[in-house]
């Protein structure tokens, strides 16, 4: 059985590590920690690890997956994602992209299949490289910028001091949502994470 490919988006390097735009990469780091795996350099310009995601009902190990973060900048994420798909022979139906979303309130998690990119350059690059928008997304809410702050500036800043205490919970929630998506499917995950 081919593995799932789970990609968390972000920008490389320590200067970007805490930015809102890197929340996808933070979720992949959480998944790696849960699996006791280290992300290693991959020839597709990414860091990746082969893991089992979560546990199935009854306690059996969850599905096989490759978790990865591109080492390219956000707007060039498509090349590494396409390279990983080719290397692991992962079909687009088993590609999940975890990314920040301005249109979702801070600390909310939403899941969907396909749709537009909403101005997100990482998603735009992936869509162009894989040739379709029909891949799964775990959308991690970062909220709208305050006042007249430019969205591009907003995503390239660390979380506000009032948000920082909630960030670990948000990362954990997104990882939980991803585990449910992979184990039980999109509908089950949406029913749990989209209910009021």
Image: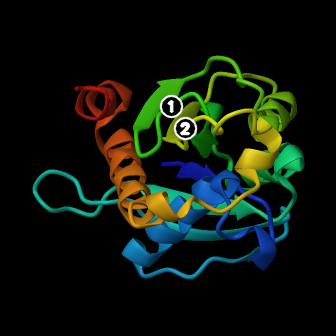
Residue 143's tag is: 2
Percent across and percent down for residue 117 are: 72, 25
As drawn, is 107 to the left or to the right of 81? left
Above or below, 102 relative to 86: above
Quadrant for residue 69, please give it: bottom right
Q: Dot 2: few (<14), some (14–19), or many (≥20) neighbours within 10 Å?
A: some
Tell me the SS state at disc 2: loop
* Residue situated furthest left in the rendering: 58
Marker disc for residue 61: none
Circles 2 and 1 in contact, beta carbons < 8 Å: yes
Residue ID at (31%, 57%): 62
- Which residue carries the number 1 mark? 104
Residue shown at 33%/28% (left/top)? 190
Secondary structure beneath dot 1 equals loop
Total marks placed: 2
Q: CA distance from mark 2 to mark 1?
A: 6 Å
Q: In the image, residue 188 lies at what x, y percent?
A: 26, 30
Quadrant of the image containing the C terminus = top left
Q: Position of residue 114 (x, y in %)?
A: 60, 21
Residue furthest top in the image: 115
Q: Is residue 172 above or below residue 182?
A: below
193, above or below 176, in the image: above
Q: Give the image quarter of residue 52.
A: bottom left
């Amino acid at each position: 059985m081919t593995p799932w490919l789970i990609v968390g988006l972000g920008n490389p390097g320590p200067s970007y590590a805490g930015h809102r735009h890197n929340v996808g990469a933070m979720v992949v780091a959480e998944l790696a920690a849960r699996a006791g795996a280290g992300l290693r350099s991959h020839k597709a310009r990414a860091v990746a690890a082969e893991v089992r995601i979560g546990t199935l009902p009854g306690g059996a190990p969850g599905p096989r997956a490759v978790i990865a973060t591109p080492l390219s900048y956000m707007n060039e994420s498509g090349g590494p994602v396409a390279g990983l798909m080719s290397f692991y022979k992962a079909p687009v139906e088993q590609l999940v992209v975890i990314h920040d979303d301005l249109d979702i309130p801070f600390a909310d998690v939403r899941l969907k299949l396909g749709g537009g990119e909403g101005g997100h350059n990482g998603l735009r690059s992936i869509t162009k490289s894989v040739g379709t928008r029909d891949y799964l997304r775990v959308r991690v809410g970062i909220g709208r910028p305050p006042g007249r702050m430019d969205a591009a500036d907003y995503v390239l800043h660390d979380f506000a001091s009032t948000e920082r205490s909630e960030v670990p919970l948000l990362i954990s929630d997104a990882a939980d949502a991803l585990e449910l998506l992979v184990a039980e499917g999109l509908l089950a995950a949406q029913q749990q994470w989209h209910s009021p």
